[in-house]
Amino acid sequence: SSRFHSFLPLAAEMCRHAHLPVSASPSSATSTDPQREQTLKLQLQINSACSGEVLLQNVAAEGTWTVRRLKLQIASDSCISFAGQILLFAGRLLADNEVLSTLLPQASEYPHVLMLVRSQPKASAGSRQLTVVSNGGPVSCVRWRVEAQNLRRKEMTLTSPMFELNFGDGLDKVPFKLSLLASDDRSFAKSKGRGFIQLKCLNGEAATCAGVLARVSSSSDGVIAKQEAYVDHEYCFATNAALKLPRGSSIDFGVFADRPSSTFEVAVEIVHLCKVEMEDL
């Protein structure tokens, strides 16, 4: 939108005064030999385009990554929503499908500095319990507020209302549900509030390959007090309809309960990567 383009001159000016090498344009990058792309390692620094402050240091990336994959990594390493990221390099807006090795110089003793503009997506549907942002773009966001008292009950599963996601690419109104699963096949009371997050597609064969970022957080008056993130960079819902996170040990949901509201929030961002042709499975 036009309001974000107003940051471009500021971002370019910051890059010029950062004392770090930057390229004038993508065309100045060196050749993108496929074998070099596979082994190319990049060190990145993410600065705020508004204030110039350092948001993330020493972000390890690979030359084969797309900008979309980098945004997912930034979201995983921070509290910055994937959908709220607009990245610039040398004053130029970066498209999600561009490959890092074609954008950044491949030889540098300093981290490459990228500028980040934050935006806040507007919810297209929602309630106090469940808020969904999914309007046909590559990123869908779901926020589910859970009553902490449920963690003291004998249920093994807590399930959100059903919601629909619009990925575009011919994938619209795809039904999903979020669930919290108590660990060790016990009730939440017996597992002392520990468990896993499950994102499940309800149409049986969602033909999407997606990156999924799940967060559990506590907040008061909109300010996040505690947060943890769990990520799967590439998951095929056509192969298995239910994704469970994290892969390793369970989550202690109780530590995220906000005292004034006695609730905690589960937020999931689903990044549509590609459409899966069913005959290829």
Image (tube, rainbow, N blue to C red):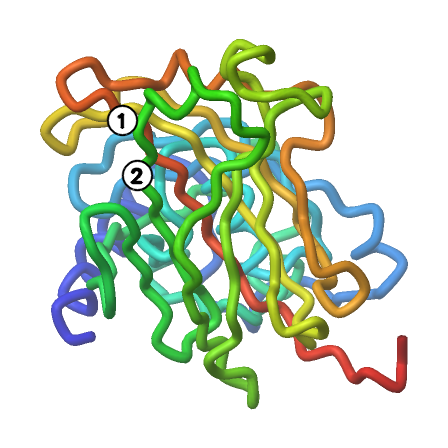
Q: Residue at x 67, y 49 (%)?
A: 243
Label 2: which residue?
Answer: 145
Q: Are marks 1 and 2 in contact (CB under 8 Å)?
A: yes
Q: Which type of secondary structure does the marked residue at label 2 adopt?
A: strand
Quarter of image, res 235: bottom right
Q: Residue furthest front?
A: 154
Asked whether, in this view, residue 176 is left or right of residue 259, the answer is right
Question: In front here: 111 or 269?
Answer: 269
- Name the spot of residue 278 as percent of width and height, x first: 82, 83
Indicate whether 132 appears above or below 198: below
Rate crowding at label 2 as few (under 14), some (14 to 19) or many (20 or more) other CA atoms within 10 Å: some
> Can residue 131 be seen by looking at this rendering?
yes
Quarter of image, res 183: top right
Under mark 1, the amino acid is Thr
- Name the spot of residue 169 as percent of width and height, x first: 56, 86
- Tell me the CA gap for discs 1 and 2: 6 Å
Image quadrant containing the N terminus: bottom left
- Name the spot of residue 250 as percent of width and height, x first: 63, 21
> Can residue 107 be seen by looking at this rendering?
no
